[in-house]
Amino acid sequence: MAKALKCLKEGCTFEVQGSSVDDVLAKLKMHAMIAHQMPQLPPDLIEKAKGSVRDL
Ligand SMILES: [Zn+2]
């Protein structure tokens, strides 16, 4: 099932879509690195992101 995840950064409306939770998390990491200069996501943010992934 396809998954979607909104960027957790306040004020950012970016949304990633992927084929699995790992896929959307990987894409979110790429987005965070490029758009927010965050090469490393803190573990608590990753956990929060995992909980925010929704089914399409
Ligand atoms: Zn963002």
Image: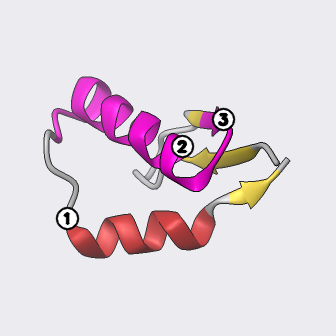
Q: Which mark is residue 3?
A: none
Mark 2 against mark 1, which lies toward the viewer?
2
Q: Residue at x 46, y 55 (%)?
A: 8
- Classify mark 3: residues with Cα within 10 Å, few (<14), some (14-19) or many (20+): many
Q: Which mark is residue 24?
A: 2
Q: Residue at x 60, y 66 (%)?
A: 52
Task: Give left or right: position of 25 versus 44.
Answer: right
Q: Is residue 20 above or below residue 36?
A: below
Tell me the SS state at disc 3: strand
Residue contact at pointers 3 and 2, CB within 8 angstroms: yes
Looking at the picture, tell me which residue is in the foreground, 8 or 40. 40
Task: Give left or right: position of 34 versus 1.
Answer: left
Gap between marks 3 and 2 measured at Cα: 6 Å
Which residues fall within the magenta stretch? 16-38
Q: Earlier in the sequence, mark 2 or mark 1?
A: 2
Q: Which mark is residue 42?
A: 1
Gap between marks 3 and 1 measured at Cα: 21 Å
Q: Residue at x 72, y 47 (%)?
A: 3
Q: Provide residue 22's location: percent of width, then percent of height.
A: 49, 51
Q: Earlier in the sequence, mark 3 or mark 2?
A: 3
Classify residue 32 by image quadrant. Answer: top left
Task: Say if the magenta span includes residue 22.
Answer: yes
Q: Which residue is disc 3 drawn over?
A: 17
Q: Provide residue 5's location: percent of width, then percent of height.
A: 61, 49
Task: Give left or right: position of 46 versus 18.
Answer: left
